[in-house]
Image (cartoon, helix red, strand yellow):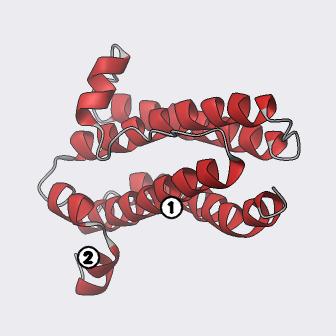
Amino acid sequence: MSNTIMSRLSKKAEAEVPAATPTEILLKLLATEYQAITMYNSAYYWVRGKDRSDLIPEYEEHKKDESEHAEILEELLLELGGDTFKNADEWRLVSPTEVPTIGTHEAAAINQVIEKSEVEAVELYTAAVQYFHSIEDEATAHKLVEILKDEREHLKEVRLEFQGKTSAV
């Protein structure tokens, strides 16, 4: 991977992605998507309980996107002869990051955790796209680029739209 790409990666992503096999990389991405689904689902209920209905449509939309990403990754894994996870314990073991813990129901704090998770997702997808280009698997790289575009959009929305909504809290 180029130094430019690697300099943008978290140390954990940098350490794990280059040494992994294609199916291991896809499993890490799938675990990241499962985490995101769980995180957005939890955030939905936490802000709903705090009468923050203005954030609910965004959380629902992002959870839907993350579910679609997971389906794409599951299909790619099967195409490459890999297998998906059998239970939550398996994906948590493979996960490239800690499962986000949100110790508050305050919308601003929840969005900080979401932003950190989206940054990590962008880093992992960037590294994975570069990896699949390097092994000349352009079909997989193309599908991951499409997911990466969504993840970048999520990050942008978290930083712009969510921050504006939570600043009114």
| Disc sitting over residue 145 in the figure | 1
Under mark 2, the amino acid is: Met
Instruction: Name the residue beneath numbered marker 2.
Output: 6
Locate the C terminus by quadrant: bottom right
Residue for point 23% across, 30% down: 93
- Circle 2 packing at 10 Å, graded few (<14), some (14-19), many (20+), is some
Q: Can residue 72 be seen in this view?
A: no
Image location (x, y in percent) of residue 28: 31, 42
Depth check: give the residue in front, 56 or 95: 56
Q: Tell me where residue 59 appears, x and y as whole percent.
A: 72, 42
- Circle 1 Cα neighbour tier, 10 Å, few/some/many (<14 / 14–19 / ≥20): some
Q: In which quarter of the image is residue 44?
A: top right
Compared with residue 73, is residue 121 higher up or lower down, i.e. above or below?
below
Query: Which residue lies at the image location 77% right of the left edge and 58% below the top edge?
Result: 166
Q: In this view, does 1 lie to the left or right of 116?
A: left
Horizontal and vertical percent position of residue 39: 55, 36
Q: For the residues marked 1 and 2, what is the alpha-carbon distance in whole angstroms? A: 17 Å
Q: Residue furthest bottom?
A: 4
Secondary element at image label 1: helix
Rendered location of residue 96, percent (x, y): 28, 46
Q: Which of the two residues, 80 or 71, is positioned nearer the viewer here?
A: 71
| Label 2 residue SS | helix
